[in-house]
Image: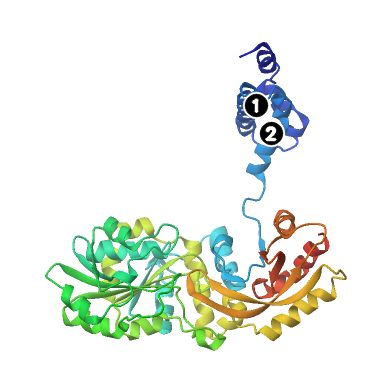
Amino acid sequence: MDAAQTEALRRLPAVQAVVLAPAVAALEAQHEVVVRCARQAIDEARQRILRGDLNAGDTVVAATVSLLAELLHDPYPPVINGTGVVVQTNLGRAPVSTHAARAMAAAASGYMGLETVLASGERGGRGSVITALLRVLTGAEQSLVVNNNASAVFLALRALCGGREVLVSRGEAVEIGGGFRIPDVLRQSGAVLVEVGTTNRTYAHDYVAAINERTAAILRVHASNFAITGFTARPELRELAEVAHAHDLLLLEDVGSGCLLATERFGLEHEPTLAESIAAGADLVCASGDKLLGGPQAGIAIGRTKVIETMRRHPLARALRADKTCLAGLAATLQHYARGDAEESVPVWWMLSRTAAWLEQRVATWLAHLDDGRFSSVATQSVVGGGSLPGKTLPSYALSIVDPQRNADVVARVLRSQRPIVFPRVEDQRVLIDARTVLPEQDDELLVALKSL
């Protein structure tokens, strides 16, 4: 260390001086928090000086302000989704309905009859209303809600198949996102994976050939975010149910998206519904609450009473159980399906049900407020996202932005950085805001953001 570095280190401000700096004091943070941020900023400046940046000490106050601002600003601000991906995992997956949001807010901000029979005042079952709703919507005897679908699958394998073999088609022993690998989940659950068939072709007789006295179940994994096409074969779920029950085995299905409506009605290919899986003979079906169901994050397990109760009694069930806000939001979401208004009230289905003509008119309405040659309307394609219907698209329309002064990546970054936040996609050197995924109440905010570009 030379003399210049020694002098620069000597001139580093004291912690108290940083704490009392007007720019720092103006943030009104708790004293110990300010002190820790100041120390961090000073330590970082010290390291920079040792690396040769002799002016690092001049930035300590600004660095402290930046650290505090990062802690105190809204960490999860609302975003206008212009990507055209309906179930956008990076943006929080499915937005819930207004009814569900109110139910979740009420549950979070006060007390609720979570495990109480209000009429008698006695302790009741957690999630009994959800079970009643799922029973009439899917035909399942019983249900259990945990914190996400991965947990539901893990709990099922642990409680029902621990120490025994589970048959899985080789084409379904997959990773479906976030490092969630079916072989790893089976191994960690204590179950033993037995792969049957081949990657592209598996038949019912492949499962039969692998059954022995150690076999506990057949597991069907729905192809959520991948597709195997071409020379393929896969037994129907009903065939697997016949095989499983003929050999006194359980049939478990990870159906993924939790769909309750027929996707064909919206111009999409068929996505298995929970009711179809139960009707086909599955003993247990696991699904996500925040994909095509359109509710809060949850793992939904439905099936035969004996199977669900075995899972419920397992010690792991308490560790994985959903909180009161999740249960309130899920119940409110399921009520839309029970009332028959999900298509208009659940945002996911509102978005999926918009026609290309409707979306084209919506973009035209935006353009009427934007007297600027940078903006135009273009035909595009939306996707479901969230691992549902991989590779399948819906015709849509988007607002296109071409700025002669800035490239598309810069424009997109500006939209993501300002308030309100707009998250577009970049395609062919154009910034696109897909009208399908902009919520109906966000039009005015979107126009404010666009006019400020």
Q: Which residue is mark 2?
A: 63
Q: Is residue 112 visible?
A: no
* Crowd class of label 1 (few under 14; some 14 to 19; many from 20; radius 10 Å): many
Q: Is residue 230 above or below residue 88?
A: below
Q: How far separated are the C-alphas under marks 2 and 1?
A: 9 Å
Question: From the viewer's perspective, is the residue at label 2 or at label 1 nearer?
Answer: 1
Residue at the far front in the pictured view: 231
> Which secondary structure, mark 2?
helix
Q: Is residue 387 visible?
A: yes
Considering depth in this image, is 230 or 445 the residue closer to the camera? 230
Considering depth in this image, is 197 or 236 the residue closer to the camera? 197
Left or right side of 250 for 39? right
> Which secondary structure, mark 1?
helix
Q: Is residue 28 above or below residue 35?
A: below
The percent position of residue 353, horizontal first and vertical second, equals 60, 83
Which corner quadrant holds the C terminus? bottom right
Q: Which residue is drawn at the image coordinates 44% and 79% (left, top)?
A: 133
Q: Amino acid at mark 2?
A: Ala
Task: Tell me the quarter of the picture where residue 247 sits.
Answer: bottom left
The percent position of residue 275, horizontal first and vertical second, equals 39, 83
Residue at the far bottom in the pictured view: 265
Task: Tell me the quarter of the picture where residue 159 sits.
Answer: bottom left
* Crowd class of label 2 (few under 14; some 14 to 19; many from 20; radius 10 Å): many
* Contact check, label 2 and label 1, Cβ < 8 Å: yes
Sequence-wise first label, 2 or 1: 1
Q: Which residue is mark 1?
A: 45
Which corner quadrant holds the N terminus? top right
Q: Amino acid at mark 1?
A: Ala
